[in-house]
């Protein structure tokens, strides 16, 4: 989450009036994340999240994302629906951007998850994958192996501005992943970005899975590898957290032997994906954006961990 686009109060009040959820009381920009502009909105009828979809989210993908959220909510997954206004419209135009008013879910994201929290989050991912077995839609992964090559090319020599030799390290990893990527594993729609800040918790209980805007059709176990690379380092590897995450998932959606064998390669792909997207954002985030840039080198260290396995 972040704020790139400012919304005039008058326009926001007019938007809220279309939903029948009371009158606007307050709206506060949310700085976490890097993808869309987000506001915490309070009305006399409740609390909501307003999301304005920025340039990285293709407006033509929104029907897929919204159908996915509705499907998961119907399956009792703890995900927030995009609300419909009085005319049944989900996608609005706000400050020139496509936008949705989204249910607010209770809970907080944890910066340093415990093993118990990781196990609960892994189990939530497993249940989500179970619910997606009959989801009929799909979406290509623009940030899969082909996308990593394209993004590395776009970053070019600027990678070495982040750290000397980073460009050559990225090229070596791309070559390795081209040779070892387990593309023949079972595929599914996946979240693809289930970091701790995209999981809401109350104690050790998961109350929300949010921010599905990278969801796509991909190797299913890559979703767990993404989580593992994001949850199990604080900043050094915490085996108790990493093992608990996998155990929680496996209890709900048993891993296949071939998925276990390929796990380190999948995790290397996850690390490279986030290294590259963070590097691009590091180099290109506008100076006046209300957004917290994230360090790409954190995922270089994690990549080295999985490469050593």
Image (cartoon, rainbow, N blue to C red):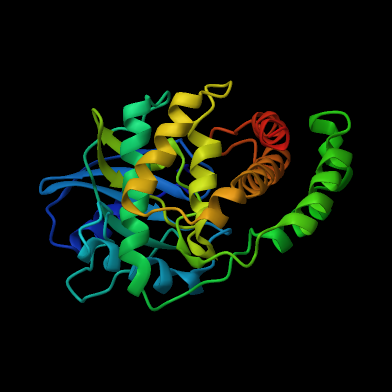
Q: Position of residue 88 (x, y in %)?
A: 22, 75
Q: What residue is rendered at 49% in x and 42% in y?
A: 227
In terms of image quadrants, where is residue 120?
top left
Q: Is residue 187 left or right of residue 308?
A: left
Pick whichever, 18 or 156, lies toward us: 156
**Identity of the residue drawn at 10% across and 49% down:** 45
Residue positioned 50% across, 60% down in the render: 220
Q: Quadrant of the N terminus?
A: top left
- Residue 170 position in % (x across, y down): 81, 43
**Left or right: where 217 falls relative to 158:** left
Asked if residue 184 is positioned above or below residue 224 in the image, the reply reads: below
Residue drawn at x 50%, y 25% as measured from the top left: 239
Residue 283 locus on image (x, y percent): 73, 40
Given the current orientation, which residue lies at the most extreme front position? 257
Q: Is residue 9 left or right of residue 189?
A: left
Q: Where does residue 24 sit, x and y in percent of width and height?
A: 20, 47
Q: Quadrant of residue 106?
A: top left
Which is more toward the observer, 185 or 177?
Answer: 185
**146, 154: nearer the viewer:** 146
232 vs 249, left or right, is right
Using the rendered image of the protein, determine whether residue 153 is visible from the camera's viewpoint.
yes
Q: Is residue 285 above or below residue 152?
A: above
Q: In what quadrant of the picture does the C terminus appear?
A: top right
| Residue 4 visible in the picture | no
The quadrant in which residue 133 appears is bottom left
């Amino acid at each position: 989450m972040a704020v790139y686009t400012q919304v005039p109060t008058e326009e926001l009040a007019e938007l809220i009036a279309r939903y029948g959820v009371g009158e606007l009381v307050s709206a506060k920009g949310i700085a976490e994340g890097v993808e869309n502009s987000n506001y915490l909105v309070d009305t006399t009828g409740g609390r909501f999240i307003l999301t304005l979809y920025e340039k990285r989210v293709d407006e033509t993908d929104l029907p897929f994302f919204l159908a996915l959220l509705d499907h998961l909510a119907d399956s009792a997954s703890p995900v927030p629906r995009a609300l419909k206004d009085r005319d049944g419209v989900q996608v609005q135009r706000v400050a020139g951007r496509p936008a949705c008013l989204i249910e607010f879910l209770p809970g907080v994201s944890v910066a340093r998850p415990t093993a118990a929290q990781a196990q609960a989050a892994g189990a939530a991912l497993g249940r989500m994958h179970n619910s997606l077995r009959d989801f009929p839609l799909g979406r290509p992964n623009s940030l899969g192996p082909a996308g990593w090559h394209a993004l590395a090319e776009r970053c070019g020599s600027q990678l070495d501005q982040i750290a000397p030799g980073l460009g050559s390290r990225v090229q070596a990893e791309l070559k390795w992943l081209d040779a070892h990527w387990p593309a023949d594993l079972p595929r599914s729609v996946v979240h693809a970005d289930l970091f701790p800040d995209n999981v809401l918790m109350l104690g050790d209980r998961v109350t929300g899975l949010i921010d599905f805007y990278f969801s796509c059709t991909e190797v299913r176990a890559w979703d767990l590898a993404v989580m593992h690379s994001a949850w199990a380092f604080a900043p050094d590897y915490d085996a108790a957290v990493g093992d608990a995450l996998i155990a929680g998932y496996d209890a709900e959606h048993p891993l296949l032997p071939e998925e276990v064998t390929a796990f380190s390669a999948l995790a290397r792909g996850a690390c490279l994906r986030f290294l590259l997207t963070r590097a691009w954002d590091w180099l290109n985030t506008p100076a006046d954006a209300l957004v917290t840039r994230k360090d790409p080198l954190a995922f270089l260290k994690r990549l080295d961990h999985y490469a050593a396995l």
